[in-house]
Amino acid sequence: LSSSSAASDVYKRQEFIIANPTVTLAEVREMTESEGSRQAGLLTSRVSHLSDIGNIVPMVGLLGTVHGLMKAFYALGESQVQTAGKQLELSTGISTALIATGGGLLIAIPTLFAYSIFRTRVQRYIGELEAASSHLVALLQALTVRASQNPTKPEGKLTRTEGKAERNQPS
């Protein structure tokens, strides 16, 4: 995700405008907003999977903890098991509980850390995309105002020259 991606997105809109010279400013604004919303939704949904994993895994670890503690207390409650056997069963149950807790945290912490990093990158990219789109719409609005103020001097069509959109001036 970089500003070059935002520039590429603006360039695609510019190409659309050149290919469709009768498009109105309102249509360009609507297209820009809808494409921006679509891109933001795609990026946000991809990153949200990390958040889901980071939030669900500790619950699975907690389930393992409860299972291990239930196993430990069950061993304490059995009357047939000798004292040494009760200690072994108790330690096995507690070990199961700690392994489940540790495993859940071992997965959740790096996942939530990665989610935080990628969420920040996505927000920055969306901001760049919105700024570039707003700039494009402002430029088009300025061109529209300028064209409406000079109705006797016709503006040429937008053309593509050396990779940039330029306005041909009639001779």
Image (tube, helix red, strand yellow):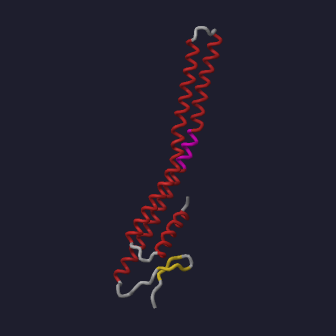
Does residue 145 appear to the left or right of 71 in the view shown?
left
For the point 57% across and 13% down, the residue is 76
Q: Which of the image's four quarters has the N terminus?
A: bottom right
Q: Main secondary structure of the magenta part?
A: helix
Q: Position of residue 11 (x, y in %)?
A: 51, 70
Magenta residues?
Answer: 108-117
For the point 56% across and 16% down, the residue is 74
Q: Magenta stretch: residue 109 in it?
A: yes
Q: Position of residue 7 (x, y in %)?
A: 52, 67
For the point 58% across and 18% down, the residue is 72
For the point 54% across and 49% down, the residue is 117
Q: Position of residue 40 (x, y in %)?
A: 47, 56
| Rendered image quadrant of residue 96 | top right
For the image shown, how many numbered marks are present on the structure?
0
45 or 10, nearer to the observer: 45
Q: Position of residue 103 (x, y in %)?
A: 60, 33
Q: Magenta stretch: residue 8 in it?
A: no
| Residue, far bottom | 171
Relative to 60, residue 92 above or below = above
| Rendered image quadrant of residue 109 | top right
Relative to 2, residue 20 above or below = below
